[in-house]
Amino acid sequence: MSLAFLHAHDCSEAHADAVWGVSWTKNDTVVSISADGSIRQSSSSSGEPHSPPNSPTDYRVPSPHTLGLVSLSVSPDGRHALYNSLEGLTSLWNLETGVSEGAFESFLREEGMGNAEPSWSVSLSPSGSTYASAGGHGNLTIRSAEPKNFGQKISTVFSGRNKFGMCCSYSPDGKRVALSSEIGHVFIFDVESNTFVNTYTSHAMSVRSVAWSPDGNLLLSASEDKRLILYDVRVSSGSSGGAVATFSGHSSWVLCADISPDGRFGLSGSADKSIKVWDIASRAAVSTVQDAGEVWSVSWRPRAPAVGSVGAFVSGGEDGVVKWWRGAGAGV
C-alpha cells in the first residue's frame, strides 16, 4: 500500500528559529514552540494566528522566553498548553482566555528537597490536575498543575538509571507515564502504585520521543539509532522485551513520533529531512514526505478521519515553519 500526503499550507508567520514542538488540538488549532523562545496558536484552516471566538479583548500570547522552548503538551480538551524552557521554566497557558495560569522554576532548589532538578520534558495529565517532568537526574516527577499550587511536588521516582530523561508522556487514560532516556531505555510508570512496572531496552541510542496509541495499549518510540519501535505495554518487559515491531527506513536520527487517532498509522520526523507515515498493521512505510530541514516535531489531527480518508498532520522543523499536510483527496 502506498499513500500520498500533500502540502496543504504553512503558518502565515514563521518562527525566528527551529520549531521544536507542535500539537494539533481538539479545537482544530495548532500550538507550536520554538528555539526562539516563542509559543503560538495558529488556525489549522488558514495558518493565521488564532484567537478563540468570544475571547477577551486583552487576550495575550505569552511573551517570548529568553531561551528556547523544548517541550510541549496540550490537554485533550484543547484548553491548556504546558511548555518548558531550555533551563527548566515550566509554564501553563490557557489557550481560551490567554491567561498564564502557572509557572514553576524547576532549576531552583526546593526547600528541604535537596538539589535542584531542572525539567527537560513535561507532560500534562489528561485530567489537567497534574503534570509529569523528567530531566538530567533519571527521575520522573509528578507535580501539581492546579493554578493555586502549580509546580508543587507530589512524588518523585528514580528510574534506576542516572541518565538524562529525554521524553515523558502520560497515557490517554492518565494511569501511566512513559519515560525515555539518553541510553535508549523506555520505562513505564504506574501512577497508582507510584512505581516503574516495565523497562524496555530495544534501542541502541537515545530515545527522543514516545507516543501512545489512542487505546493506551501500544507505545511508539523514536530513536537516534534511526529506528522506531512499537511496544505492547500489556506485555511484561521480561517476556520478549515487549517490542512487537521495528520500523526502519530513516537514514538519520528519528526525532519525533505520533500515532493516528484511529490507531492505524504511525508518524515520524527525522534529521534526514523527511517525514514518514507507517502502516502499523503491515509494519511498513506507506508514505515519505521530503522537508526543507530536520523535522523536530509531528502531530496527527486528533479528529478521526472521514470514511475513505487517511487524515492529516502538522509538522515543525529547522526552518521555523509550521506546515500542514493532508491525505490526497482529503480536506484539512
Image: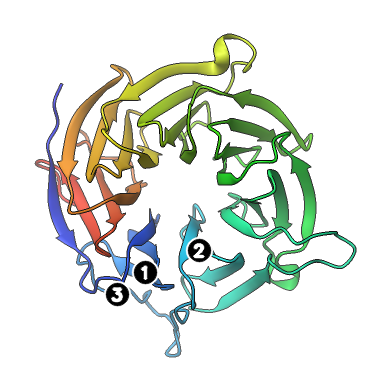
Q: What element carries label 1?
A: strand
Mark 1 or mark 3: whose residue is earlier in sequence: 1
- Do residues under tags 1 and 3 come within 8 Å of each other at their CB atoms? yes
Residue 308 shows in this picture:
no
Residue that appears at 63% across and 25% down: 199
- Do residues under tags 2 and 1 come within 8 Å of each other at their CB atoms? yes
Residue 97 shows in this picture:
yes
Percent position of residue 164, x then y: 61, 45
- Residue type at mark 2 is Ala
Mark 2 or mark 1: whose residue is earlier in sequence: 1
**Front position in the image: 188 or 272:** 272
Residue that appears at 57% across and 68% down: 92
Q: Which residue is the site of mark 2?
A: 81
Mark 2 to mark 1: distance in Å?
10 Å
**Front position in the image: 83 or 57:** 83
Q: Which residue is the site of mark 1?
A: 41
Percent position of residue 139, x then y: 71, 45
Taking the image as shown, residue 180 lies to the left or right of residue 68, namely right
- Residue type at mark 1 is Gln
- Counting other residues with Cα less than 10 Å from the Cα at mark 2, is it few (<14), some (14-19), or many (20 or more)? many
Mark 2 or mark 3: whose residue is earlier in sequence: 3
Taking the image as shown, residue 106 lies to the left or right of residue 329, namely right
Q: In this view, does 8 lie above or below 102?
A: above
